[in-house]
Amino acid sequence: MTAAMVLDVGLALLVVAVAVWIVAAGSAFAAVVGFVSFGLLLALAWARLAAVDVALTEAAIGSGVTGALLMTAASRLRPTESRSAGERPGAFLHVVAAVLAVLVSAGLAALVLIPASPAPSLAPAAAVHLPELDVLNPVTAVLMAYRAVDTLLEKIVLLLALIGVWSLAPDRFWGGAPGLWPRSRPDGELTLLARLLPPIGIVVGIYILWVGAIAPGGAFQGGAILAAMWLLIMIAGLRPVPEIHRQWLRLVLVVGPAVFLTVGFAGFFLPNGFLSYPAQFTKPLIIVIEVVLTLSIAAILGLLVAGPPERERQR
Amino acid sequence: MRVLFDSFTVLAVSAGAVFFLAGTVGLLRFPDSLSRLHALTKADNLGLGLVVLGLLPQATGPLVALKLITVWLLAQLAGAIVTQLVARAVRRENQEA
Amino acid sequence: MLAIAVPAAGVVLAMALGGRQAERIALAAASAGLCIALAIAANIWQSRTPIAYHLGGWAPPLGIALRADGLSAIMAVTTAVVICAIGLFARQGFSVPEGAQEARAPMVFWTLLMGVWAGLNAVWFGADLFTLYVALELLTFGAVPLVSLDGRAETLAAALRYLLFALLGSAMYLLGVALFYGAYGTLDIALLSGLVRAEPVVWVAVALMTAGLIAKTALFPLHLWLPPAHAGAPAAASALLSALVVKGSFVLIVRIWFDTIPSLLNQAAAQMLAALGAAAIVFGSVLALRQERLKLLIAYSTIAQIGYLFFLFPLASAPLRVASGTTELWTGVAWTGGVLQLVSHAVAKAAMFMAAGLIAEALGHDRIAGLGGIARVLPMTVFAFGLGGMSLMGLPPSGGFVAKAMLLMAAVAEGQWWWSVVILAGGLLAAGYVFRVLTPALAATDAPLTLRTPVSSGRQGVVLALAICALLLGLVPLRPSLLLEVGRHIPTTVIAR
Amino acid sequence: MNAATLYGLCSAALVGLGLFGAIVHPQPLRKILAFNLLGGGVFLQFGVIARRGAAAGMGGDPVPQAMVITGIVVAFSATALAVTLLLRLYQVSGSATLSIETQSSSESDGGGR
């Protein structure tokens, strides 16, 4: 057994152990804490699987932003825990669920142990077209060119989710600001962090976006980091949470998908149709789209965490 | 020269690992939140510092070295501030209890 | 492809401009979308070949294809018609009040309406299993907030329950997608159909995907989320959810069984699905009979009507029998009948939910016991409800009649008579619950009925027009539709007996 | 056994755990957490497939990797929507359970918009 193998076995066992903890933990808060470390461990697993792009996304979004969201929810919902403890479902449901889960797991495990050989892969096909796109990171090429429509539709999913979150506001607060109130004193430590970290974070976010074309990184990962910085600034109270009726805010939210769609429509004038890029402008176009997408993603992710409007609109 | 660098790396990283181990044991064994924080911060500051220091000779260029140091500095900053916040929360909880 | 892009663009524009513009953009997109859907259908009707479109010029397996066949064309047209009707119907309930720049419910409703539409069209035309996953999520994210639009605790709980079911379902589906990719290196349905072999990975993948999609379609016994969600939503949204959204995941099951693994169709599994469908018909109808409230009754009837759809699996996939030689025709009849059931239920159910919405609006409640004499005040609405009900019962000359008759004929001809018993029993039960509503509604009462709010005849007209569409579907001839045969995989397993 | 197989087994375990948790936990928040575990397992399955498809000088097949990135973002938006729904439910009703819906069938007033 090599050292790398020992690391992998340890990591895999740890991931499963933390997962068991999340399911079995006594309090929701403890489970959420477990979930954040679960996300980070999973990011390591992704790195071990040679998927650095995914590792970055998992760490930033799967663990970081999701963790922040769940943590807030767990602390707000703490009073309800003791009450709902009495509603444990019966033994019958437990048995059914356990049998189902074991069946699915066993089936999957069996399939994992008899892999298709040779393993199918689109990597060679993806590699062939990279020079035409002038993009060196194959994952970016898949997201922005080969399977661009998935990315585009997923942006619409994000927008719908945000509208869904906003829709949960009481009528009178529509147009107002989300309820992410400042939690620290102006001279507190958090304020210090919110002053020091964002400049670095913004540079890192832009860097990650920029290298996306040649190395792991891209709009999602960069956007998530920018969103985190924005949230930090808002929580520390250095900048107010914007009211959701603001025109500039709406524009930032949609500029990414809008530009993407416009370029897509422009493709109708090209031989390859919707969502194709003109040969000589491929790389600049992809970069422009990625930049605006990053802006929109950062804004949407941030506002998804900030939640529905909870204050009346200022007149 | 190479051997010297490598042995320095091994030494420093191992020392860092010892601090992490001690910190983790402390986190698990200490009785209250404040002393657990204490154990954890030691691991963060010194352990990570030693690991980064150990890795510096292995850096392939000044940019990589700079990134390593940045990682350490950021961890320091975040660690210090989060510790403060947790400690404050603990004190508030104690006062309420 | 334009059909998806137009509503998607609508979402983006509405979000950007907000306020009063959202409604105008939605209505403009609706009319444009109707034209596009009709154009696609006409094209397929004339050329008799499916249209394939490679996005960005990247051919599968690396790229993504969209594919329009007979089924997708019909569904796209149905969707466009129903959405236009819903849009016209909702203009009154979801307009921005005077003096306000923008209000919550209208903004949310109009943008999500377009979001759901984009998702539906992506489901109808998608030919890549992962694109279809994203499309499913579009549907979920569009549909869930519509359920809780009024913000009461019950609807919030219903929406949350719906979301959890839907998410679990999509996760199962996505797992199946992963297995398909791992085994064959492509997710394009047409390519997969040529590659799949009878091996464990396919069975596990299809089982997972089917289970997940059943949860989203609300087939018995995974239907628990549907009644509170559909009954709690505003009428226009209920119509959208019941008529179209559940059909999205159903069509996906059809795509997997009939298009992805056509050569491996398993009669035993198909019989099992149909058995669940039969249970849904009986269970849903009986519960519908026992409801106190009109909207819940209609929601339970949706569960029953979804059950019919699952007869498609054994009936349209029955192996050819050399002895009789005519089964191929009968599977075609079943196929057309099943799809017609999809379409006629969509139209009829949308009309019924909107009719119920008008009644509830006029009376301020929707208790069935308190409907006495409503037919005198809202004759058009009750008439529309009755027409929709006819289609559910399967009375001639409605679309529901033709659909059920075709399924029935196919069941008898293919020797699967047991399903025909359920189809007939389901019709009787449907008659029971429809008349439970119509009897008090048509009854003469002494006490004059006071309406809380007047109901505009324009909205009544929209509902009636939709119900008449359901009726007109009854004029479809009782034979396999040529349009629907476009791009259909004819089962090729031949069993000599 | 190689790393891909190992993480494949890990993914199978996560899927089972997530499924179990999502069914048995009465609290919606725990169901949401379990759904995220399940999602993690599903995504890892894509990762294993990508790793096995390493070719053409790439450490893994980029197509499934890109799908996972899309999937993670979708899972996050789902979590955000679910959590907000849950918090709003708590705000409106003072409880955070799904059992409220059983009352709606007996509730007599209300109805459509």
Image (spheres, coloured by chain):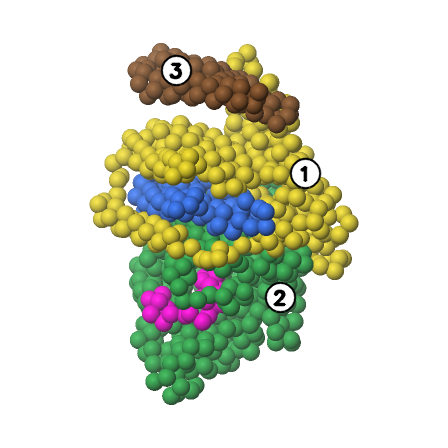
Q: Is residue A56 visible?
A: yes
Q: Are the residues under marks 2 and 3 on the same chain?
A: no
Q: Secondary structure at mark 1?
A: helix
Image quadrant assignment for residue C298: bottom left
Q: Mark 3 — on which chain does it sit?
A: B
Q: Which residues are magenta?
A: C248-273
Q: Amino acid at mark 2?
A: Ala
Majority secondary structure of the magenta segment? Answer: helix
Q: Is residue C148 magenta?
A: no
In this picture, is C409 found above or below D100? below
Q: Which residue is mark 1?
A: A291
Of all chains, the one bearing label 1 is A
Which chain shows up in green? Answer: C
> Where residue C314 sits in the image (x, y, percent)?
38, 72
Query: What colour is chain B?
Result: brown
Callouts 1 and 3 on one subunit: no
Q: Position of residue A74 (x, y in %)?
A: 40, 30
Q: Label for residue C52?
A: 2
- What's the chain of the residue with tag 2? C
Residue C387 x %, y %: 46, 69
Q: Is residue C149 left or right of residue A175?
A: left
- Residue at x-position 40% and y-position 86%: C322
Q: Identify the colour of chain A in the image.
A: yellow
Q: Is the Cβ of the residue at disc 2 closer than 8 Å to that at disc 3?
A: no
